[in-house]
């Protein structure tokens, strides 16, 4: 039995926990406002908001309901368009902005945009044209050409900005993000009670233990539901997504430890990551889209073993190590992330093992991430690559270069990295190292580019690393 | 005036096909389609599928009661494969089950024994093997042979432009219900309700008067649902006929992408001749269109390629030949622009080629050759041109010279970013080139409470046609637009409709509505005169009133009383009016005539920045001066321009339809076929209305706006090309669209 709050209603269901939230709301709850454009996370027509209690507050994030299993809705607040429509038939500020700017034509994508913009209004963080746009970076519209939607997003941002500014003095009075959203009519009044209702759900359900019935794990579902949608519905996979013991970012004196179920957005919002990676936002913006980043876990990225996983490339270049824990025996072992990959989609991992911790050292001085794809954003890389350097006194003490899309597995460019290690930090080293890369990679031609192109791209992106790290000094 | 659907759209209350409440007993269909592009279909084994859980029936070609034929133009398109398969994705069997999930699971259990035959995927290969859909089409003006001899400069070359997936966000689908008379009610996501009705009639053998097709709206069409909605409706209809149960099929995205056709890829040869003053004297062009496995709309698309082969330019000697080549791809079909963009890409490439070779700016050649009123187009129509006006207004408002200078200065500063600027004039003919299609009807009822119901043949798909039609009715009657409701498109209310296509739906159906309303108004005027009503008729009615706002400021006084009084006096408050575009016609036997009611003109300036390190690009701006005539709805029209530009840029840049050599679609999902996202669009899209008072045949003088702006996107290709040239001026990229990041990088770093 799964329990969660759907809009203003607590629902209980015995339907398979692998069924998607999308199918549940449309075909079992007759909430037809949520649309289907692709069922693979790539269009945003199915976007819903997911509210979750963290530190006593309800925080909302947008997610694509087509990839979200009911299992990951348990104990949360799922909001569809029907859950934010004003009861009097009127419009919320996001809806008004889209109407006023003619940001809707055929209307099929529109609800997704409304949900994303509402999610933006409910979230904290900086208010700017840029952040408002990134809230809708997972929503595809084929009709409008986006300019009208951009204008609407800008309006929402201005409104939010006005609220933020006007409430600085009266911060206490203004209360939480949710109280503000209620006062502007962004969400209905019942949102007030959701925190309390989620707490009750939680207490009632807290004696429910994670049952480990089989060896099928899932986390955010963004890979599994794209690859094997039909199968997942009845697979009975155990979700690791909400296990609090798998979601943490801890900083120690010389390293950072991360839980496997941490999602990309958690990194974006982490103080530690923003400090260690000054270009964090610019780099992570290249990874999928807001709703997918809200669901995509690090372990999911590592274990799906795609040769072009962005977070995989990122963490390989950090020399990350992963702890593998056998869920049946409890045995633990730790290996280098780069050593997880034995061959195309074959891993040094038993079915019963999960990744339980990711660790990397903080002693790098330079880091850069590069990715080129057919469409710059919300696309899988043709080639991606990351580099970390530890430089002192003009010498490279340690270099690690990773690259994806150029071999059956994500690569640590060992020869290139070794070559650079111990050499002066400067153009000559990069120019010489560039030549080694071509011997380490074996790209093939596919829909993401010809082998020849990927070889050229590998060289160019390595040059881009050179430019980036030298300007970083 | 906003699109009238806006409010229900943002509240998620607008109804699309998959939202229609499902009736008890509904079955779900799923198609088993060919995994092979070309082959002999030896046998189809449906036993395992038929005995799968929930399956009620499996249908193959032999089960059809009517004809196994849905070809609209040529009878060359079976609904279900019989004997042979012609493309990957060709429907072979239909599984019907109690649930969608069961139907899908069972469809994968169907087995077909197919003996593969050679598959052709390339248009030129098909041409070489004599595989054509029909005889070639030709346009001829002047004498090119002679003219080339006198040219100071002659250049020739090849171009290619790729396909384009429509990617309407709502996939194709249909839902059919049996009606008690042995007929059918068909809900379809189609731009052509009559086309669906005909296809259903063909495969079921049921006469058209027993087939009701109803369309509320589409979640996007762009041409993809003009003819290609037929198959899904026909499949559901046949299924309902055979099982006597309602049947629904809403395609999954990958099924849709795999089984439906796209914009036609073209490969072309050109030869262009200029005199010493850079005037284009002669143009010779051969188009090889990749039609796919059957005709579909390929021939009219091919014709429009010819109609627009000289774009916005006057060329006195033209010889154009177009071949529709039959290949083993899904039948390619209508897509916004309908072959026009493909034709324009070639002349723009030819001009760029000449400019490169002569060391002059591309825009210099463009400007010198723009059409003037009175010029003869290659198909004989004497043009009423705004081409020069649009160009000069764009030039003076946006200051092209300065934009170019800024780019040049920027490019001198070094660094890995380079800028390119390109001009893109357009000229697009409005009307169906098949003259009989230029007709429409509108049914208008005025009710005794003063409310008005309008039905037309136009299908609403986001382009705002119903809003414009409501504006017409409100303006003629001088009532508030809230009193007008434009209803679903329904073949029982409006018969024999032309599809909503060719940008012409608002013109044709708007004019028919205007006529219907004016007839009713005339009768009301008589009643008013008898009553000696004061302030009747109110100022502004009958002629459109305040078209920009739709409803006039003050509501017509006494409207409700007058309507009531008229009803009591037994005056007819309904009208079914007919409109046929006057003066259009075309004679294919000589390939000359006056096919278009009018042309739409405009000029865009596109600015791009290329990252020469990574091969990626962004668009800084598209600034255009566009010929709206006098726009009756600037909000709707602006949306059409912005959307069209971005779709055109997509076609020219990141949208790459990839088939492998066996005819299998590789770009078969949204993860591998990329359309513009919010970050791919130009930072700025500026739109100026061309200042013109010239009368035209458009509804309320408000020119058609659906297709033309897409072609501004062609400028994106040439802007990128300019930037690539700025990186290395020896570097002259081939004319091979789309200009993907891969092609850019490979061009930038050739060695
Ligand atoms: C629209 C879209 C865009 C995308 N864009 C990108 C992109 O730009 N870059 C990119 O790299 N990826 C992208 N992806 C892929 C995907 O989002 C990521 O790989 C994501 O990190 C997967 O995480 P998940 O939690 O959703 O994995 P899931 O789908 O839940 O699981 C993936 C695999 O990991 C296993 N797994 C999960 N957690 C654990 C664990 N703790 N221990 C052991 N095994 C585990 C599962 O069993 C499964 O085999 C995209 C996906 C979509 C749908
Ligand atoms: S349906 Fe496209 S993202 Fe979910
Ligand atoms: S309005 Fe049609 S897809 Fe956005």
Image: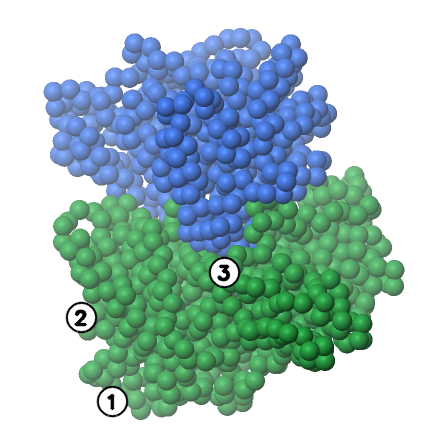
Q: Which residue is drawn at 67% across and 39% down?
A: A31
User: Where residue A282 sits: x, y (%)?
Assistant: 32, 35
Give the chain coloured blue: A
Q: Earlier in the sequence, mark 3 or mark 2?
A: 2
- Seen from the viewer's position, the closer of residues B356 and A350 is B356
- Seen from the viewer's position, the closer of residues B363 and A156 is A156
Q: What element carries label 3?
A: helix
* Label 1 and label 3 in one chain: yes
Give the chain coloured green: B
Residue B553 in which image quadrant: bottom right
Q: Which mark is residue B150?
A: 1
Q: Which residue is drawn at 61% across and 73% down?
A: B535
Q: Earlier in the sequence, mark 2 or mark 1?
A: 1
Residue B132 in which image quadrant: bottom right
Label 1: few (<14), some (14–19) or many (≥20) C-alpha neighbours in 10 Å: some
- Which of discs 3 and 2 lies nearer the camera? The answer is 3
* Tag 2 subunit: B
Q: What element carries label 1?
A: helix
From mark 2 to mark 1, how far is it between C-alphas? 21 Å
Residue A239 visible from this viewpoint: no
Q: Is residue A390 left or right of residue A166?
A: left
* Label 3 and label 2 in one chain: yes
- Which of discs 1 and 3 lies nearer the camera? The answer is 3
Q: Which mark is residue B359?
A: 2
- Seen from the viewer's position, the closer of residues A166 and B74 is A166
Q: Which residue is drawn at 41% across and 22% down?
A: A171
Q: Mark 3 points at which residue?
A: B636
């Amino acid at each position: 039995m799964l329990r969660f709050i759907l809009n203003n209603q607590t629902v209980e269901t015995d339907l398979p926990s692998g069924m998607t939230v999308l199918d549940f709301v449309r075909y079992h709850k007759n909430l037809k406002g949520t649309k289907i454009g692709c069922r693979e996370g790539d269009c945003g027509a199915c976007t819903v908001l997911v509210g979750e209690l963290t530190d006593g507050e309800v925080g909302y994030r947008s997610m694509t309901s087509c990839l979200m299993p009911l299992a990951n809705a348990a104990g949360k607040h799922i909001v569809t368009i029907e859950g934010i429509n004003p009861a009097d038939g009127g419009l919320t500020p996001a809806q008004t902005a889209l109407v006023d700017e003619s940001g809707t034509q055929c209307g099929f994508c529109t609800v997704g945009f409304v949900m994303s913009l509402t999610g933006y209004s409910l979230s904290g963080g900086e208010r700017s044209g840029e952040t408002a746009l990134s809230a809708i970076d997972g929503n595809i519209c084929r009709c409008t050409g986006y300019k009208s939607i951009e204008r609407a997003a800008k309006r929402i941002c201005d409104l939010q900005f006005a609220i933020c500014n006007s409430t600085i003095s009266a911060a206490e009075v203004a209360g939480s993000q949710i109280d503000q959203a209620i006062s502007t009519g962004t969400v209905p009044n019942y949102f007030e009670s959701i925190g309390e209702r989620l707490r009750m759900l939680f207490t009632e359900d807290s004696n429910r233990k994670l049952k480990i019935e089989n060896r099928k794990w899932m986390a955010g579902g963004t890979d599994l539901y794209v690859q094997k949608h039909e199968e997942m519905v009845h697979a009975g996979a155990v979700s690791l997504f909400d296990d609090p013991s798998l979601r943490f970012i801890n900083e120690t004196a010389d390293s950072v430890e991360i839980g496997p179920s941490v999602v990309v957005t958690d990194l974006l919002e982490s103080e530690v990551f923003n400090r260690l990676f000054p270009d964090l936002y610019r780099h992570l913006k290249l990874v999928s889209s807001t709703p997918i980043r809200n669901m995509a876990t690090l372990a999911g990225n590592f274990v799906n073993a795609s040769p072009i996983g962005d977070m995989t490339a990122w963490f390989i270049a950090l020399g990350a190590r992963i702890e593998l824990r056998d869920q049946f025996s409890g045995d633990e072992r730790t290996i280098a992330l780069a050593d997880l990959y034995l061959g195309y989609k074959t891993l040094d991992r038993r079915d019963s093992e999960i990744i339980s911790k990711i660790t990397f050292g903080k002693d790098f001085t330079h880091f850069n991430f590069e990715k080129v794809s057919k469409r710059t954003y919300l696309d899988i890389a043709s080639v991606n690559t990351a580099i970390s350097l530890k430089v002192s006194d003009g010498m490279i003490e340690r270099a690690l270069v990773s690259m994806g899309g150029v071999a059956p597995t994500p690569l640590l460019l060992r020869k290139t990295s070794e070559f650079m290690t111990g050499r002066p930090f400067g153009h000559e080293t990069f120019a010489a190292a560039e030549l080694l890369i071509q011997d380490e990679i074996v790209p093939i031609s596919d829909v993401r580019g010809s082998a020849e192109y990927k070889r050229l791209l590998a060289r160019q992106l390595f040059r881009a690393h050179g430019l980036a790290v030298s300007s970083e000094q | 005036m906003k699109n009238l659907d806006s409010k229900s759209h943002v509240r998620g209350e607008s109804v699309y096909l998959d939202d229609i409440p499902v009736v008890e007993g509904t079955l779900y269909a799923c198609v088993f389609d060919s995994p092979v592009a070309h082959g002999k279909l030896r046998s189809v084994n449906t036993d395992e599928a038929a005995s799968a859980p929930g399956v009620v029936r499996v249908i193959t070609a032999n089960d059809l009661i009517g004809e196994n034929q849905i070809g609209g133009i040529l009878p060359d398109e079976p609904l279900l494969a019989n004997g042979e398969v012609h493309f990957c994705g060709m429907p072979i069997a239909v599984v019907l089950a109690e649930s969608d999930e069961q139907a899908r699971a069972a469809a994968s259990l169907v087995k077909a024994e197919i003996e593969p035959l050679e598959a052709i995927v390339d248009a030129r290969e098909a041409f070489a093997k004599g595989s054509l859909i029909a005889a070639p089409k030709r346009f001829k003006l002047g004498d090119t042979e002679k003219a080339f001899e006198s040219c100071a400069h002659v250049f020739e070359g090849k171009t290619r432009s790729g396909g384009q997936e429509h990617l309407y966000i709502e996939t194709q689908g249909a839902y059919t219900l049996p009606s008690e008379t042995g007929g059918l009610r068909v809900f379809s996501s189609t731009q052509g309700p009559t086309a669906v009705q005909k296809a259903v009639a063909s495969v079921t053998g049921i006469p058209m008067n027993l087939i009701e097709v109803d369309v509320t709206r589409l979640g996007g069409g762009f041409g993809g649902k003009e003819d290609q909605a037929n198959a899904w409706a026909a499949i559901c209809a046949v299924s309902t006929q055979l099982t006597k149960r309602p049947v629904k099929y809403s395609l999954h995205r990958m099924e849709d992408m795999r089984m439906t056709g796209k914009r036609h890829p073209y490969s072309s040869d050109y030869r262009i001749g200029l005199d010493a003053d850079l005037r284009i004297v002669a143009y010779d062009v051969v188009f090889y269109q990749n039609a796919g496995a059957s005709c579909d709309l390929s021939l009219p698309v091919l014709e429009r390629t010819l109609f627009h082969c000289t774009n916005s330019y006057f060329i006195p000697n033209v010889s154009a030949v177009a071949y529709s080549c039959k290949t083993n791809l899904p039948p390619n079909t209508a897509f916004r622009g309908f072959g026009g963009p493909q034709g324009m890409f070639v002349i723009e490439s030819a001009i760029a080629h000449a400019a490169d070779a002569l060391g002059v700016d591309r825009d210099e050649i463009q400007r010198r050759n723009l059409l003037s009123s009175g010029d003869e187009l290659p198909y004989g129509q004497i043009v009423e041109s705004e081409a020069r006006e649009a160009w000069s207004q764009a030039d003076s408002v946006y200051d092209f010279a300065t934009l170019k200078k800024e780019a040049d200065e920027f490019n001198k500063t070094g660094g890995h970013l380079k800028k390119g600027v390109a001009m893109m004039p357009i000229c697009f003919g409005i009307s169906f080139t098949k003259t009989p299609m230029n007709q429409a009807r509108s049914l208008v009822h005025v009710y005794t409470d003063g409310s008005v119901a309008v039905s037309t043949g136009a299908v609403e798909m986001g382009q705002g046609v119903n809003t414009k039609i409501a504006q017409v009715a409100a303006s003629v009657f001088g009532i508030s637009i809230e009193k007008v409701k434009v209803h679903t498109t329904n073949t029982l209310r409006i018969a024999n409709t032309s599809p909503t296509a060719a940008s012409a739906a608002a013109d044709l159906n708007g004019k028919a509505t205007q006529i219907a309303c004016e007839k009713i108004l005339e009768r009301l005027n008589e009643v008013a005169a008898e009553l000696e009503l004061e302030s009747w008729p109110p100022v502004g009615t009958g002629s459109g009133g305040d078209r920009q706002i739709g409803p006039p400021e003050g509501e017509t006084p006494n409207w409700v009383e007058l309507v009531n009084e008229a009803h009591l006096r037994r005056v007819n408050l309904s009208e079914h009016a007919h409109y046929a575009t006057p003066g259009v016609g075309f004679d294919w036997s000589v390939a000359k005539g006056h096919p278009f009611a009018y042309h739409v003109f405009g000029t865009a300036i596109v600015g791009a920045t290329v990252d020469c390190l990574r091969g990626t690009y962004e668009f800084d701006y598209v600034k255009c001066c566009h010929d709206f005539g006098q726009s009756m709805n600037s909000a709707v029209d602006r949306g059409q321009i912005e959307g069209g530009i971005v779709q055109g840029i997509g076609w020219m840049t990141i949208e790459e339809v990839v088939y492998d050599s066996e005819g299998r679609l590789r770009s078969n999902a949204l993860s591998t076929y990329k359309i513009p996202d919010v970050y791919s669009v130009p930072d700025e899209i500026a739109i100026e209305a061309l200042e013109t008072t010239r009368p035209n045949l458009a509804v309320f003088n408000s020119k058609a706006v659906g297709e033309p702006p897409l072609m501004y996107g062609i400028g994106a290709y040439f802007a990128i090309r300019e930037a690539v040239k700025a990186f290395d001026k020896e570097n002259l990229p081939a004319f091979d669209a789309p200009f993907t990041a891969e092609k850019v990088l490979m061009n930038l770093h050739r060695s």
